[in-house]
Image (cartoon, grey):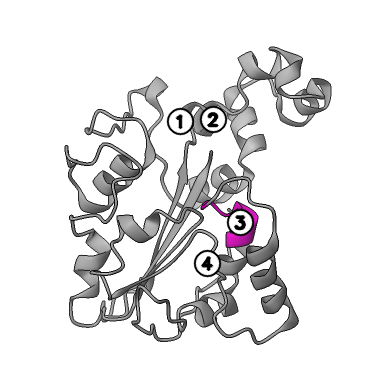
């Protein structure tokens, strides 16, 4: 199961610095091999029952070199991010980024990533409310950052990971929560209806495409962050991303 998390920090208190927004996007379950070498030959040329039409998939994603394959699989990452930024974690070149909690599943990893330290007590995705303060909660308490931090995730457990009952300065919209609190357009209402009525393959894990629409649309960001959730009554001031992006 893949889970997607988008965190938006509006760094309005940075004064003369040009940076206004800090966005952290996390794809749970994505392998470093997929990022740096593209389509996996053992899958594309393996058991056809695993993929269905393997000929079509090989035509779409198989290329002679790792550089070509990764760009074909992730054009935005390698065509834009790599050109304008930096990418780390290619183990074949000695760049390694590893967790320290000794576990290979979601909640312990998110806790470590968002707090900076592993917690040996967290050994289950059903752990419950996180006793540790995330960096986003810490920042939300600083002058200039109040009501300026938001998290949008496909997985409902993010409510516990961010501990929305304690971290009232961090707006969290997670799982199958209808994303638009006050629909202003027909498309807003349609999106909310899809969240409520679409078949759920997982009980509390929404589809990436739904959350992308809810989070990447600048107007949706503004409307979402004005919303009020039962666990987090804080109202966030209107926020806009500078531009939409392709997940």
Q: Which residue corresponds to the image point at 34% horizontal and 78% vertical from the top-left?
A: 148
- Separation (CA) of disc 3 from disc 2: 18 Å
Q: Answer with left or right where residue 20 lies relative to residue 191.
A: left
Q: Which residue corresponds to the image point at 23% horizontal and 58% vertical from the top-left?
A: 134
Q: Nearer the viewer, mark 1 or mark 4?
A: 4
Q: Answer with left or right where residue 102 lies relative to residue 41.
A: left
- Separation (CA) of disc 1 from disc 4: 30 Å
Is 85 placed above or below 18 here? Answer: above
Mark nearer the N terminus (1 vs 4) = 1
Give coordinates of residue 104: x percent, y percent: 35, 30
- Separation (CA) of disc 1 from disc 2: 5 Å
The disc label shown at residue 246, or none: 3
Circle 2/circle 4 CB separation < 8 Å: no
Q: Count the numbered circles shown.
A: 4
Give coordinates of residue 67: x percent, y percent: 58, 28
Secondary structure, mark 2, is helix
Circle 3/circle 1 CB separation < 8 Å: no
Q: Nearer the viewer, mark 2 or mark 4?
A: 4
Label 2 crowd bin: few (<14), some (14–19), many (20+), radius 10 Å: some
- Range shown magenta: 204-211
Label 4 crowd bin: few (<14), some (14–19), many (20+), radius 10 Å: some
The residue under label 4 is 177
The residue under label 1 is 32
Circle 3/circle 2 CB separation < 8 Å: no
Circle 1/circle 2 CB separation < 8 Å: yes
Circle 1/circle 4 CB separation < 8 Å: no
Secondary structure, mark 1, is helix
The residue under label 2 is 34
- Separation (CA) of disc 3 from disc 1: 19 Å
Give coordinates of residue 180: x percent, y percent: 57, 77
Mark nearer the N terminus (4 vs 3) = 4
Q: Quadrant of residue 52?
A: top right
């Amino acid at each position: 199961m893949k889970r997607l998390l988008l965190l938006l920090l509006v760094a309005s208190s940075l004064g003369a610095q040009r940076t206004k927004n800090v966005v952290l996007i996390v794809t749970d379950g994505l392998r470093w091999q997929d990022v740096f070498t593209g389509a996996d030959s053992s899958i594309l040329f393996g058991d056809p029952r695993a993929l269905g039409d393997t000929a079509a998939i090989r035509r779409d994603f198989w290329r002679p070199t790792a550089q070509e394959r990764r760009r074909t699989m992730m054009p935005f990452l390698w065509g834009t991010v790599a050109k304008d930024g930096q990418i780390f974690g290619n183990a074949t070149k000695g760049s390694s980024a590893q967790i320290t909690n000794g576990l290979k599943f979601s909640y312990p990893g998110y806790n470590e990533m968002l707090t900076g330290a592993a917690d040996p007590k967290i050994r289950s995705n059903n752990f419950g409310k996180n006793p540790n303060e995330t960096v986003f909660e810490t920042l939300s308490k600083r002058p200039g950052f109040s009501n300026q931090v938001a998290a949008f995730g496909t997985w409902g457990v993010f409510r516990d990971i961010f501990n929305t009952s304690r971290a009232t300065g961090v707006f969290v919209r997670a799982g199958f929560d209808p994303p638009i609190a006050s629909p202003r357009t027909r498309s807003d209402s349609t999106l909310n209806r899809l969240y409520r009525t679409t078949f759920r393959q997982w009980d509390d894990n929404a589809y990436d495409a739904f959350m992308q629409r809810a989070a990447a649309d600048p107007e949706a960001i503004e409307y979402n962050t004005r919303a009020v959730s039962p666990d987090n009554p804080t109202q966030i001031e209107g926020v806009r991303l500078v531009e939409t992006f392709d997940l």
